[in-house]
Image (cartoon, grey):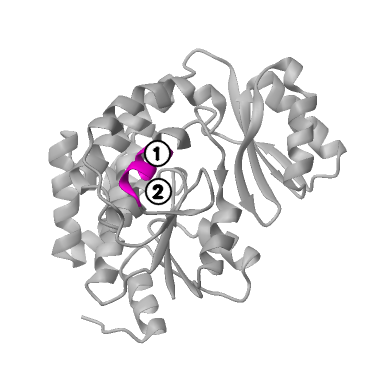
Amino acid sequence: MIAFVFPGQGAQYAGMGADLAARDPGAADLFARAGRILGFDLLALCASGSAAALRATENTQPAILVTSLACAAALSSRGIRPAVAAGLSLGEYTALVAAGALRFEDAVSLVRQRGVFMQEATQGRDTAMAALIGLDGGAVERLCLEQRHLGVVEPANFNGAGQMVIGGDGAAVRAVVAAAKSAGARRAVLLAVSAPFHTSLMAPAAARLAPLLAEVELHDALFPIVTNVTGEPAQAAETVRDLLVRQVASPVRWEASMRRMADLGATVFIEVGPGTTLSGLIRKTLPATTVLHVEDGTSLHRTVEALGARVH
């Protein structure tokens, strides 16, 4: 059984999507359609835009979404489709488009607004995020509780392979980083991000996103989407709608999601979109599975060959 996994913010890099768009008219069309919604040339931003512009959350989110969907379309045209999927944070929207639950145009508009709302939720507030490696979830949660007197600090990502991300108020996050090193963490480092994503400080963003999601037409997914909030599969449109609102200010349960896809029968995982971060996590968490990725023409060819699928 094939599972698709879609990357989230942080996977972006200059040039992503350009190779596929040059080779595949369908990929180029997706970028053109997104550009009409956004009001600027998204492919040009990905191919040759400034690093600062590509890092801006309201640009990054649609750029990764469209690049990932172009990769998914290239796979689909070669007969490679998933039986189950998941996406990390933003990637959950990509998975829902791939599963026919969310229209492409709606997804592009939503993730741009989502990026703006998340960026503005803590504007002017000293916040931080940090990666902790080598401590289990329970230990990290205890460290966060011990530093809550300094402000909000919470787990934001349960990534698996001994990796966790925390976020919240700057002083509290920095205190947890210091305490984590004393508690035996192999690494504890602050991350260069602009807001404490997937923490309760994102509640204002969730509140602004909710009415937009309420107006969007959603359909039941064609295959199960294992969701960030629960680590469990969902297909019903109204369940998905509720979880997308909750996802903004809830931790991403990525390890649970990977393991659940394996429980459902996934033996081949394809990371669909820029980068290979998720591939690394899957290899460490589920070493018995086959892990492939598609982000450009070369990796597409290798994945198609590995699966013995038809090459156009």
Residue for point 29% across, 61% down: 222
* Label whose residue precedes the other's in the sequence (1 or 2): 2
What is the x, y in percent for residue 137?
Answer: 72, 45
Decide if residue 6 is in sight here. no
Where are the magenta residues, as a range?
Answer: 236-244
Q: Which of 264 and 104 is in front in this view?
A: 264
Q: Distance between the residues labelled 1 and 2?
A: 8 Å
Q: Quadrant of the N terminus?
A: bottom left
Left or right of 17 on screen, residue 248: right
Report which residue position mark 2 lands on. Answer: 92
Specify whether residue 240 is painted magenta.
yes
Decide if residue 213 is in sight here. yes
Q: In which quarter of the image is the C terminus?
A: bottom left
What is the x, y in percent for residue 87?
Answer: 43, 52
Q: Which of 7 and 199 is in front in this view?
A: 199
Residue for point 73% across, 16% down: 150
Amino acid under label 2?
Glu
